Amino acid sequence: MTPTSAAPVTLPTLPTLPVVSTMAGETAVACCAPLAAPVLSDQEATATATLFKALADPHRVRIVNLLATSPEPVCVCDLVPSLGLAQPTVSHHLKKLVAAGLITREQRGSWAYYALDRDAVSRLAAIVDFQGHVQGQGATR
């Protein structure tokens, strides 16, 4: 057998990646630049996870929606027919939302009235500001 000579292989030239400055004044490759969003503390992350856990049930999301669209606190007796659930089930979901700090409870005689805690919703919105991210970064999804 006679050896055959192969033509030399030419590899393409890789593009040079741009270097950017980080918030800490360091430099990094642009594709690997650190995130610009503020970092949550352990306590803030735990509190936020509690809010998300409370909203992990579709019935609780509907309760929050009903309370968000109501100008006045709502009696549990008014939520039962709107949700199509038994009163003890609605009370269970309300208890979870109160414990998470998403809604407030006010006792009026034998009935409890619930309202959305606007401060909790504002805190949640500040953490999950997807709209601001999309506008600020020019990204689309």
Image (spheres, helix red, strand yellow):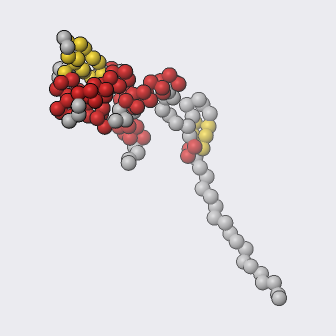
User: In the displayed image of the protein, which residue is found farthest to the top?
Assistant: 109
Q: Specify whether residue 65 is in view.
A: no
Q: Is residue 58 left or right of residue 12?
A: left
Query: Of residues 83 and 32, which is closer to you in this image?
Result: 83
The mark total stands at 0
Picture layout, residue 11 above or below residue 127: below
**Residue beneath the point at 27% across and 17% down:** 105
Q: Position of residue 1 (x, y in %)?
A: 83, 88
Picture layout, residue 128 above or below residue 91: below
**Residue beneath the point at 70% across and 71% down:** 9
Q: Quadrant of residue 22?
A: top right
Q: Is residue 65 left or right of residue 31?
A: left
Q: Specify whether residue 91 is in view.
A: yes
Q: Is residue 45 left or right of residue 57?
A: right
Q: Position of residue 15 (x, y in %)?
A: 60, 56
**Residue beneath the point at 67% across and 66% down:** 11
**Residue beneath the point at 40% across and 31% down:** 53
